[in-house]
Amino acid sequence: MQVRLHTASLPAITSEVLVVPLTPEELDSEHLRTLDATLSGLVRDYLQRSGFRGKEGELLRIPTQGHLPSRDLFLAGLGKRDQVETETWRRVAGRVHKDAKVLGTRQLAWFFPPADATEATLAAVLEGTLLSGYTFDKYKSEKNTKPAVETLTLAGPTLHETPALLSALEVVQQTAAGVFLARDLVNEPASVSTPSYLAEQAVRLAKGNGIKSRILGLKQIQAARMAGLLAVARGSAEEPRFITLVYTPKGRAKKKIALVGKGLTFDSGGLSLKPAKSMETMKLDMSGGATVLGVMHVIGQLKPPVQVTAYIPATENMPSGSAQKPGDIIRYRNGKTVEVLNTDAEGRLILADALINAVADGADVIIDLATLTGACVVALGPQIAGLFSNNQDLAAALLRCSKESGEPLWQLPLVKEYKDDIKSTVADIKNTGSGSAGAIAAALFLEEFVGGVPWAHLDIAGPAFTEKDGPYTPKGGTGFGVRTLVRYVLSVE
């Protein structure tokens, strides 16, 4: 999609569809009166007949009948002015783009009065527009034949190109590509998106982007003594992979950031078998790894002044005669032993290997993402991810980036008293808790492997995959976390 910036008054904007955003307080604004006069009273007529009130999500289409250089005028409701946030613009832009696409629109323009012509607002409109255009139809016989929107014009009387604005729009465009990569990887069937497939995509991503890749196969994983990954992989005919990607900036890196993503390409539960219904969407269990690959794609394009290393343990969790059994004990490379009581609590087992590696490689900050627990979905629902951290400055930074990106996080506590729930009578710890506070128990398990390094764990089990269309997120993989982590990496000083 081509993005144009244009300094123009409202009646002079040329496009197939012209979008004018409005709050309820602005139904008698100067620019709306100007439009009404230009269209010979059509605006007032349509407003009265439609009952449009400027609520968020309302969209009123007015054919311009040749009175404007645009074919159609869209009035887009924002909701009450004091409740309009950056995410509001993102949601409304997604809805507008979908409706414009249905009309076969190739040229779409937004008008911004001076008060709204900010970098954050313009970037949010571009982001909502781009993200809402994602489709995954490669396996459908009938494709969507509607043409794509080719040009998005952002226009207003005080809108001018500045280096800061151009940079903000570039970040959005590159980040959207990372989100699409993550969505694609999650939406592929598990028989396609296998551990070896993930590794191949990682190598392809790294080429030409200033990123070094290292892929460990089964024998190398055995030599590296990655006990958790090996234990989980035992039941599958698919061999595991351990994926490492390293981006190193020119000059001295400000920080070394480790991103760890769970790459469980299909989770049957192992011998602790899931019900059939619960397996239907278990291709999503590698969403953490997909997000990390999406972030690395963006990092390779934007080249921030920090070192970023991605670690993705990739495997299936399957039942077979060779699968690990409840009651097995794993001894990790750092000497810690784990009793496996439930083979369906496998994500933490493979993440532990990656966390050990990140600590050994000297990371200053570690952030892991995983569709880890159903308990987190029970606590926070399908739209919000849980945030756990041993460092409040890191937690605060991620919460800020989450707010800016529209990917909601909610901080949950690492309750030290609950550590007793993961103590084992035959090993150091066990991989399940007492049955309550399951998301906290899982986070406390992971904390055992970070060695005091500033660390955050994002449990994205709820928002990583959606069963219904959102304003800019279609059904399926969402790419949740890519936008938040890109913002975080770019903000590190």
Image (cartoon, rainbow, N blue to C red):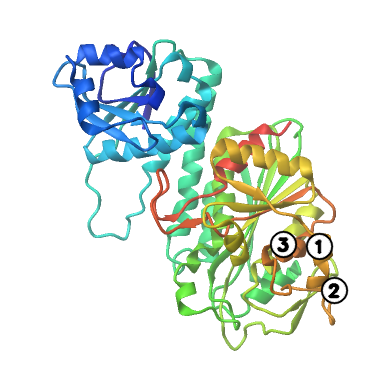
- Asked whether the viewer can see residue 207, the reply is no
Percent from the top left, x then y, of residue 193?
48, 63
Image height of 452 relative to 425, above or below: above
Relative depth, front residue between 265 and 74:
74
Residue 493 in view here: yes
In primary-sequence order, the first of circles 1 and 2 is 2
How many neighbours does mark 1 have within 10 angstroms: few (below 14), some (14-19), or many (20 or more)? some
Residue 221 image point, x, y percent: 69, 68
Amino acid on which disc 1 is placed: Glu
Q: Residue at x 43, y 31 (%)?
A: 126
Q: x%, y% of residue 15?
A: 26, 22
Quadrant housing residue 34: top left
Looking at this view, name the residue that lies furthest to the bottom. 321
Q: Which mark is residue 448?
A: 1
Tell us which disc is closer to us: 2 or 3: 3
Q: Earlier in the sequence, mark 2 or mark 3?
A: 2
Contact between marks 1 and 2 (CB within 8 A): the answer is yes
